[in-house]
Image (cartoon, grey):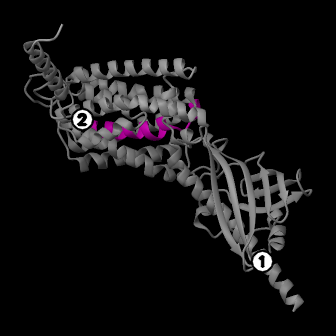
Amino acid sequence: MPMKSKDISKFFRKGDRILNHLRKWFQISNPLNGRAYALIGFIAFGIKYTCDVLLAKLIFHRTWHLWDYVRGSNAFYLWDLQKQDAFFFASMLALAIPFMALGVTMTLRRLNTLKLSPWLVLIFFIPFINVPFLLGLACMQTSTQDTGLPYHWPTRKGIGALIPESGLASSLVAFGLTGILVTAAVALNSTTFKYYGWGLFVFLPFIQGLLAAWLYGYHRPHSFGECWIISMLSCGLAGIGLIAFALEGAICIVMASPLWLGVATVGAYIGSGIQEIRWRSIDKNLSLLLCVCAIPFLMGAEFAIRPPVPLLRATSTIDIHASSETVWRHVVAFSDLPPPKEWVFETGLAFPVRARIQGRGVGAIRHCEFSTGIFVEPIEIWNEPLLLRFSVTNTPAPMEEMSLYSHIEPPHLHGYMVSKEGQFLLKTLPDGSTRLEGTTWYEHNLWPASYWQLWSNYIIHQIHMRVLRHIKTLAENEQQNRDAYHR
């Protein structure tokens, strides 16, 4: 039966109302209260997880668990996937796009409601930080829209009774308490979990910066610059505590500081921003308790998950004015290197001393002696004078920590940066000289992997160049002596 014009008009009006309603949902300027934001988030995540489980089981015949979201967040893990696994994760990513769009839109609406910077939506994509951040947005309340009560600063009740109102005293409490908290958390990680991941290097400094700024501005607001200084003082106090209690050495703290201070700055920015948002007393106390309790929980969760370790590669090259046959003899084994002049090795990082070999050809054992021990390298490919490739069966400590004590042994000195294979590739150039290329394949159990790879690649490159320059000197001297003899 054909529809009447009146029915058609009614149908389109109803459609317009639905579209207008949806348009309001995705309008950034439309306010969104904390309860609605949390409810949307929980429902959307529940639907997404259900869809992911069904997609994995029905289409790809595999299981999908909550911790797989953490494993899938590591870019190096995705790059090393086989073709079948890559197609699976590409499908999962395609399914996640509408949910990410919804999450970003609702987060922007919530940030706009709280009058916070919209750029904070980028935290939505950062593992470990995004969970407490989104929960914090749900707990935050404005002075009028969420409560209808007049704006006022917290009274000296609950946690407020422990925080002085004086600016100097509150700053001492803020960076003192957070510095001690972080030192204790690192001690817990070093003695119990012994895992150096996102929870330690991202979530912990974020909470440190946020809590330092939040405690400092508990009774009265302070500028971001003031809050940032307090958070940096907290980081400095934690660093001193780690050295004083022999939990870490100075060099490792320096290497971690760019990442740590950067993330703490983000936390301090958010902490300074929420000063102007009134929370009810129960919300403040509960939020602080959740932040503190989440630290060991997330560290333990990451320890239990243990994402797969990526195999990384570092390559260095040098041109040598000598024949490949001459260079080969000094590649296989070389005499004592002179004392290092590079500043990086003055910090305690391991450096090569000499190399010797037992046997000849495939199956021979090469021993590369470092300042901290010996690399044992069974030869796998002996293609004289073009390619020498070997596995690594023993890896000494990567460094000797600089500390107040004669010797300390943080867990990351053993099994966290491990060489797996190495090779020397020789190429004869048109002018008769040789291009020598040294490559190391290695693993490191430090996360975020992309940040720590910057350091590890730099260190390995310095080690490579120390060896390559020594081989260059030996080979060129031998070539010059041979040429002079023939003349």
Q: Is residue 110 left or right of residue 430?
A: left
Q: Going by the picture, which residue comes out furthest to the right? A: 359
Q: Is mark 2 on a helix, strand or loop?
A: helix
User: Which residue is painted at 67% across and 42% down in the image?
Assistant: 414
- Segment colored magenta: 191-215
Q: What element carries label 1?
A: loop
User: Camera-side residue: 66 or 283?
Assistant: 66
Q: Mark 1 points at which residue?
A: 322
Residue 32, by quadrant, is: top left
Residue 191, by quadrant, is: top right
Q: How far apart are marks 1 and 2 (CA)?
A: 63 Å
- Most common secondary structure along the magenta stretch: helix
Q: Is residue 175 left or right of residue 251?
A: left
Q: Is residue 465 left or right of residue 264?
A: right
Answer with mark 1 or mark 2, whichever residue precedes in sequence: 2
Q: Is residue 212 visible?
A: no
Question: How far from the left and from the top, in percent, is residue 187?
Answer: 52, 35
Q: Residue 126, relative to residue 135: is it above or below?
A: below
Please check the rendered image and state whether residue 208 is part of the magenta-colored stretch, yes or no: yes
Label 1 crowding class (10 Å Cα cut-off): few <14, some 14-19, many 20+? many
Marks 1 and 2 close (CB-CB < 8 Å) = no
Please check the rendered image and state whether residue 107 is part of the magenta-colored stretch, yes or no: no
Q: Residue 108 carries which label?
A: 2
Q: Residue 284, relative to residue 242: is it above or below?
A: above
Q: Residue 355, relative to residue 127: is it above or below?
A: below
Q: Residue 384, relative to residue 166: is it above or below?
A: below
User: Camera-side residue: 111 or 370?
Assistant: 111
User: Which residue is painted at 10% across and 15% down in the image?
Assistant: 10
Q: Residue 299 carries which label?
A: none
